[in-house]
Image (cartoon, coloured by chain):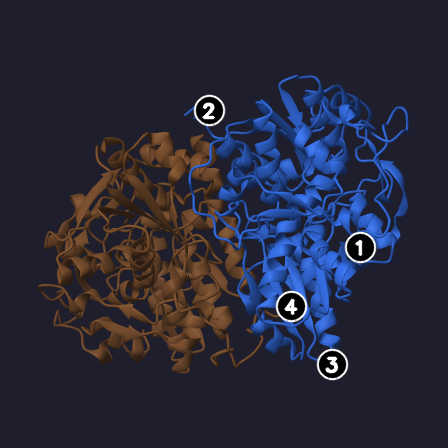
Chain colours: A brown, B blue
Amino acid sequence: MTTQPVTSSRLEPLGTVVPSSVPTHWYNLAADLPEPVPPHLHPGTREPLTPPDLAPLFPMALIEQEVSTERYVEIPQKVREIYALWRPSPLIRARALERELGTPARIYYKYEGVSPVGSHKPNTAVPQAYYNALEGITRLTTETGAGQWGASLSFAASLLGLTCEVWQVRASYDSKPYRRAQMEVYGSVCHSSPSELTEAGRAIRAEMPDTTGSLGMAISEAVEAAVKDPGAHYALGSVLNHVMLHQSVIGQEALAQIAEVEERVDVVFGCAGGGSNLAGLTFPFLGKNLREGTTTRLVACEPAACPSLTQGEYRYDFGDVAGLTPLLKMHTLGKDFVPPSIHAGGLRYHGMAPMVSHAVNLGLMDAIAIEQDDAFAAGLLFARTEGIIPAPESTHGVAGAIAHARAATTDEVIVIGLSGNGVLDLPAYASYV
Amino acid sequence: MTTQPVTSSRLEPLGTVVPSSVPTHWYNLAADLPEPVPPHLHPGTREPLTPPDLAPLFPMALIEQEVSTERYVEIPQKVREIYALWRPSPLIRARALERELGTPARIYYKYEGVSPVGSHKPNTAVPQAYYNALEGITRLTTETGAGQWGASLSFAASLLGLTCEVWQVRASYDSKPYRRAQMEVYGSVCHSSPSELTEAGRAIRAEMPDTTGSLGMAISEAVEAAVKDPGAHYALGSVLNHVMLHQSVIGQEALAQIAEVEERVDVVFGCAGGGSNLAGLTFPFLGKNLREGTTTRLVACEPAACPSLTQGEYRYDFGDVAGLTPLLKMHTLGKDFVPPSIHAGGLRYHGMAPMVSHAVNLGLMDAIAIEQDDAFAAGLLFARTEGIIPAPESTHGVAGAIAHARAATTDEVIVIGLSGNGVLDLPAYASYV
């Protein structure tokens, strides 16, 4: 079998009937924020980025979305068709967990693990691949940690007729062969990062031959590879504003689903690494707070081992190690911070999405740090009551919600963002059990 | 954390609102067959089994279902609540695959990979655990090959408050640590079979110390363990009539879903190992053929390496190696047949469900054998067009359907039973790619 995509007409809609419960527009929190999100800065001039600055990396449609302040952006029909494979994702009442906890609270979880790769990442991988293909790009490069994002972009690239090359953090490349196989099944090529294939990779290897890698390093490599190939673009799975935009399908669906059964939501818990799962679920609730005066509390649950929101500084920093990306105003532990090798690989990032950082800085969202053992204990309890094994990343949101529900004295309504399943993270659970 | 179930009140319904599209009854093909299914025989007397013969292994409700000829059996509300976690499973039009094949046929797939363990197996694991718990049983034993069944019963046992002990075929135990971890996350204990824990296991190890195991051997061990413990019962994931009954939710849903968009179904392809996925999807279609005169063709797709339907004899044989099970009238390669170590571990069984065997013998269903390479090629094409990576077992049905669709000259309607996803079988794909 060839690893090339099998047809070149992948951009035409197929005629799938898409349920009306799949959102028709993405929601953009920038339209409702009381103060604008600080702009990204050019790494050389430290002046606000202009669209041409980003053109070597991204298609114009995504660059426009990155700076848009329109409240709603229409979702292309082709993207909605692919979304319909797993969207709307279910919002499920966790009645068995409630009974186990003996809580008067009502707990719901929005479950993104039903996507073909098992997480929320395809929500942005699909439109990113789509807009690139529409602009005539034939090859995408990206980085990945645990592999959820690399697999998601590979999935999207395959369906939309693009090739895809992924730099995976070495620690995960060596320990998670299933994710690499998943990328290869979709026709992608996956490299261990730092690699010998890029200047950035070679420089890091010369300096730190035994490094286990980091997302920051892998981003440097993927960005460099894209910049050097006119037919290639780079795709980022979190952090940037357009990623937050795409993920808003989660929260929009959740708002509609919860409105069918509850009058209000008191508190939402979501795990936070780069911020895309958290933003996707919470920003539509936050927009409602800002526009309509509702008071839903929104809680970012980050790992205690990589506490950018609760321990980091709020300042401009690079998104990668080599300093190739724009400067982003965000909560950061510093671009050279190498997080400990925790099981929630998707949360091992030194920074945080500028939009999430801004919302936290304005006091519109809260942040808490969760210890790994507490996260796994919560994941195990969830699996043994609700039947779904949460991804290690998602267990942080579960842990936050469980602690809250145990202390609850009223019939408040809690929503958990269950960003993915833990099927490919079972060895991590086994070592905990 | 303890590995004990966390509460003892797991049998009470939780009050979940179950969609009406989740079947309320299981469908029993025995009510519509032109000739009765030959009875199971006692392994000692070779007389038809009586209910007391089975009582050491199964709860009375399942024994009654095993011999029932009622057309519909009501599904307990508690079971429907758990089904509602992933049911109704989606019926999806494979438009991208159709376009890739250039076929005039319309292809649909019924996707069981949305269940928490990724396959159709929980459809019977849940009611089996339920009826056992209702009868006061506290411990279940079973065997598993690749691990789909062991994980499914572990999932069901966890939700219903039972402990569960699984004997896994050694070849899979050694090569598939993720599945074992999945069982352990749900609180089960998993042994490599043949083990030193049973007389059957010790005898096999004495005779064949280097054996990689087989389902037949593992069944002997699990049955022996259950018989020796009055608080324990055994659970079988395929082959028996009550398993076919429980799986009928698949085909009932598919019939209702396809009727919304198509006037007729021309042909249904499903993979066949022990027969439960195949029966679950096809029996409701076959019942309709028998009652209403429709002419939907039903095709069992088995691996060429383990061809019980296409190469086996139709006769009474044991379900296990040691001869502890009842004698079943079935297509069999002989109880001592050790199938080659193909990747579709769930299809490595020497026999075939008596109800499926009977239907094939009466000419009501067809059977074809698929080579492993053709199955993987079909799986890869499916993944790169439709986006879902089929389980290695399921690729056999996909391969049958693709070959049929390539040859199609009219707009016929094809339904594929996609029994599970291949997320935990990615290394098998990687070795093929």
Indicate whether A429 appears above or below A320. Answer: above
Left or right of A277? Residue A315 is: left
Q: Which residue is mark 2?
A: B8
Q: Which residue is mark 3?
A: B409
Report in which chain the residue with disc 1 lies. B
Indicate whether B185 appears above or below A330. Answer: above
Secondary structure under the numbered disc 3 in the rendered image: loop
Residue at 58% from the left image edge and 69% from the top image edge: B94
Marks 1 & 3 on one chain: yes
Mark 4 neighbour density, 10 Å: few (under 14) some (14–19) many (20 or more) = few
Report in which chain the residue with disc 2 lies. B
Please tell me whether mark 1 or mark 3 is closer to you in this view.
Answer: 3
Residue B45 place in picture, x, y as percent: 90, 24
Q: CA distance from mark 3 to mark 2?
A: 58 Å
Q: Which residue is mark 1?
A: B304
Q: Are marks 1 and 2 in contact (CB under 8 Å)?
A: no
